[in-house]
Image (cartoon, helix red, strand yellow):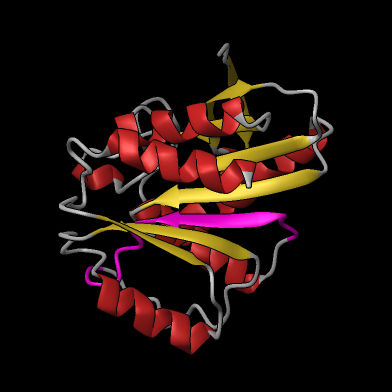
Amino acid sequence: MMEESITITGNGNICLEGYLNRQETGKALVLAHPHPLYGGNMDVPLICRMAACFQSAGIATLRFNFRGTCGSSGEFDNGRGEQDDVRNALAFLSDQGYDQLFLAGYSFGSWVNAHVVSAGVDLCDHIMVSPPAALLSFDQVEQLPNTGLIITGENDDLAPVYLIEDLLCKWKITPQMSVISNADHFYVGALDELGDILLDYLQS
């Protein structure tokens, strides 16, 4: 579906590049990409596949590059400034007239999002793909309300099922947990199954 190039302005003269797909439903999603120091950006195939699934479900999508990534200004900030990037992306959608907001992230993006959600934000739903509990600490994430779906791979060494289950017990939440057989952290050969899980969830 059609996407238009947009710029999100934030604190400290930070300008983030992104792509917005518009829908008429009032529903819109912010998508957060994986770790920029390991090649993550808004154009990785999994982020694009997730965007397509939400668009098919009638939900507008905003995928963007974190500060210091590709054409976005600023520098990588170890997840601190990136939380502001997510908040500014959500505010951008609100300014565009969307009043039902969704938040989803993959790997590092899901870790950044978790801190934003824990601190408090008005969302319809929060979705995580491969939250990297074996790589990054979630100790400062005290709660995770409105989290409806978590997806990980059976062979995902960075987001192993047992560590995610420990976090769910800590947060006292019971989202749908989908584990894709034989998939690793990069979902090579598993994007179709991931897309099917996401579409089924959004349409249920």
Q: Is residue 97 magenta?
A: no
> In the shown orientation, is residue 177 left or right of residue 184?
right
- Closer to the camera in the image, 137 or 186: 186
The quarter holding residue 38 reads: top left
Q: Position of residue 69 (x, y in %)?
A: 36, 35
**Residue 156 position by quadrant:** bottom left
- Horizontal placement of 111 versus 189: left or right? right
Q: Which quadrant, please, contains the N terminus? A: top right
- Residue 16 percent location from the top left of the image: 52, 32
Q: Give the percent coordinates (x, y) of residue 178.
A: 38, 59
Residue lying at 45% horizontally and 57% vertically, measured from the top left: 128
The range drawn in magenta is: 122-135
Q: In front: 65, or 157?
A: 157
Q: Residue at 62%, 21% (x, y): give it.
A: 21
Quarter-wise, where is residue 157 in the image?
A: bottom left
Viewed as shown, does residue 109 lie left or right of 87?
left
